[in-house]
Image (spheres, rainbow, N blue to C red):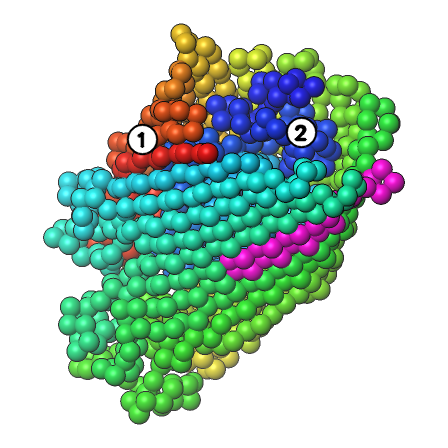
Amino acid sequence: MKIKYLIALFLGSTAALYSQQINDTISKEAKIEEVAITGSRNKKRTVIDTPVPIDVIDIKQVSQSTGQVEVNQLLQFSAPSFNSNKQSGSDGADAVDPATLRGLGPDQTLLLLNGKRYHQSSLINLFGTKGRGNTGYDMNTIPIGAIKRIEVLRDGASAQYGSDAIAGVINVILNDRDKGFEGNAFYGMNLFKSPGDKDVVSDHKIDGLTFDFNGNLGTKIGTKGGFGNFTAEFINKEYAIRNANPAIYEAPRQRFGDAKSQNVYFFGNVQLPLSDNLIFYSRQGFSNRNTHAYAWTRGANDDKNIPEIYPNGFNPIENTKITDFTFDNGLKFKVLDWDVDFYNAFGSNRFTYEIDNTLNATLGIKSPTSFNAGGHSLLQNTTGFNATKQFGVLEGLNVAFGSEFRYEQFQIIKGEEASYAAYDINGNIVTNDTPKNLLVTVPGSDPVRYRPGGSQGFPGYALDLNKNRNNFAAYIDTELDITKKWMVSVAGRFENYSDFGSTINGKFATRYAVTPQFALRGSVSTGFRAPSLAQKYYDLQFTNFQGNQLVTIQLAPNNSDIATLTGIPPLKQETSLNGSVGFTFNTGKFTATVDGYYIKVKNRIVLTGNFPRIDLPIEVQEKYPFIDQAQFFSNAIDTRTKGVDIILSYNETIGSGRLTATLAGNYNEMEITSVNTSDKLKGKEDTYLSARERAFILSSAPKTKVNLNLNYKISKFNANVQLVRFHQLTLIGYNGPDDYQTYNAKVTTDLSFGYDFSKNISLTIGSKNLFNRYPTLQREAVSAGNTESGGIFDPVQMGFSGRQAFARFNFRF
């Protein structure tokens, strides 16, 4: 039975997208009933016969043949409907890559760890080109070395899993190997070459040096199938700077590029049978990431600079520290033939900022050059159970039900006073009542200009905040095989949130096997996403450059006096309607899956554009005289997304070797169908969501993304080539809707060669982005200080570091 199952999985799964990687997706020791398939609570259901598209990605196989050391980037170049790119000059987002599925928001894809809800990052994305105004999950807090496989459910699943699953679900399955030690050492380097006629320069010809070492130990516990699997991993990555040539451009950024970072991980996966009918499991995770990223340049004669401290100007450095902790525990047992899983999943994410090589301009020559700017944290604890049972109805009925209680807590951690305050000429903190003649001015300025307060590069948080909420959920999930060819699935879920009320969502899905080779499938569902605590309570005043001008912007909490006076309504849930239809076809050597989808989202929460002072109500202008602009979180837009995923796979024996070819493509088109302004802001739709802000939302994913992967293995040798084509993207600068910045379609090529010296030792060498492709140069925009990043291109599509060479040494014993 097991052999037939593995053969069927190899030939027919939607995971054929990675058929060259599936051989080890289910280990030889695994039992069928232990195989978890996201999107179905039926233990007998496999990815072959699910009514919705699911990709199963063998992380070990993919990571060994590529130069990727982080989960987000590995998926970015593997799954066509998944998009994530590096950021630069985006504050905390330089340390966290915002990720999207099917072009929706980073917070509209749910992340699970071994089937249990994973906690979000405490970061909310404010700058950069992706995920503006969204919270999301930091997949890079999970080390690649600890992962067995990743299951990607490309379908709305809020009725099954709750909030955030509008676009789909990503389920990370941890290693469960119970014997031996496996490890690998990775070393990579960027080989700099300018993409234009010396338009881009770098500090070094070789940079971005990356070292990754991970070790995974499996051991048996007891004699009844217990095991412990433990992973330790260390990653060190140096800067990869890509500056606009100062001899040609007067760019606002002198230090644009990949940040420097150091990551340390420890993850454990333990299972221990306590009796014949009781199994205890525990998953522990810890990660610590220190990132050093450059902010925008302050010139020698800049209002933000004190020449006595920095005669030549300065480049602030944002040092961020992310501490992430996971502790999941549970019991599995049987009650009246029901398989019951009772669990508690705890997670926390703490994000703090230390700003170096900076100053507070209002303190003059007395200013410190380093500040503790505070930070934010998120805690989540979920207690729940689920029960599953098979019934002999028709060809088989599976019923699952369960309940969850979740507690969430969001905190803003106050920074030191000088990191956020502005001081007057007497050294007192500036308030709304401070006379203008006491403000610190720029010497000799005409008209008079004032020095900005707070730490340059990133302002400190000015308050301590602690907010929490809880929610209760209950669900039922059924699957019925009406005949051997036809199955239907119906699911429903109720949730109640302490801060905004209740919601009920449902899902219907079906699959019909027309022939043993050809099957039709489809689904329709409703979905929701609860506003995050960060979106409701985030509070920050900061300075920003717009067209080389410094402005003071207040990002006001949703429940603040400014928001109320401006007419911003309280946040409510996002809702969605999802539909998909497709087919699967396989002949053994050839496999094809095609799935079209439609996603309609109402009341999507985004970060509004910046309302200039003149557009704010008179009451706001009078009460807050030092605010140049204000922006808010609001249920501002409705969107409609439609697209199609196509996955073709072919495998053939050629000579003494095996060739596997996979072509995978995603077509994704999103439109903003409505801008939902408040009554007080009617007529200001273009500010509420400007053409610039619309472009950021619509550029969350390229319109098309195509992956071609060719793998040939013969004896101890294997070769892998991967080409990824990213469609054209268009952003808009600060000078209105006609200020286009177009990033042309690009193709990246990755090439690697591997050799197995023995069963226990292998070596892979290769290159990412072999032909040194960069995003399209924005020469005119950078001269005008008009790119979002301040560099000669924005952080879009495939990254901005150029070619990388790497070697990976794998061993086990």
Q: Which residue is at 71% across, 43% downward?
A: 273
Q: Is residue 305 above or below residue 178?
A: below
The spot of residue 790 in percent (x, y) is 28, 55
Secondary structure, magenta segment, majority class: strand
Q: Nearer the viewer, mark 1 or mark 2?
A: 2
Lower position in the chain sequence, tag 1 or tag 2: 2
- Identify which residue, 286 or 539, lies in the foreground: 286
Q: Which residue is at 28% across, 36% downward?
A: 805
The spot of residue 690 in percent (x, y) is 44, 55
The spot of residue 369 in percent (x, y) is 28, 74
Image quadrant assignment for residue 771: top left
**Is residue 626 among the parts visible in the rendering?**
no
Q: Secondary structure at mark 1?
A: strand
The boundaries of the magenta stretch are 324-349
The numbered mark at residue 765 is 1
Could you tell whether 341 is left or right of 292 in the image? Answer: right
Could you tell whether 542 is left or right of 377 in the image? Answer: left
Q: Which residue is mark 2?
A: 31
Q: How many marks?
A: 2
**Is residue 228 among the parts visible in the rendering?**
yes
Q: Is residue 331 magenta?
A: yes
| Residue type at the position of mark 2 | Lys
- Identify which residue, 194 or 375, lies in the foreground: 375
| Residue type at the position of mark 1 | Ile
Image quadrant assignment for residue 627: bottom left
Q: Residues within 10 Å of mark 2 (few under 14, many from 20)?
A: few
Could you tell whether 766 is left or right of 515 in the image? Answer: left
**Furthest-top residue in this view:** 655
How far is the residue under mark 1 from the one under mark 2?
34 Å
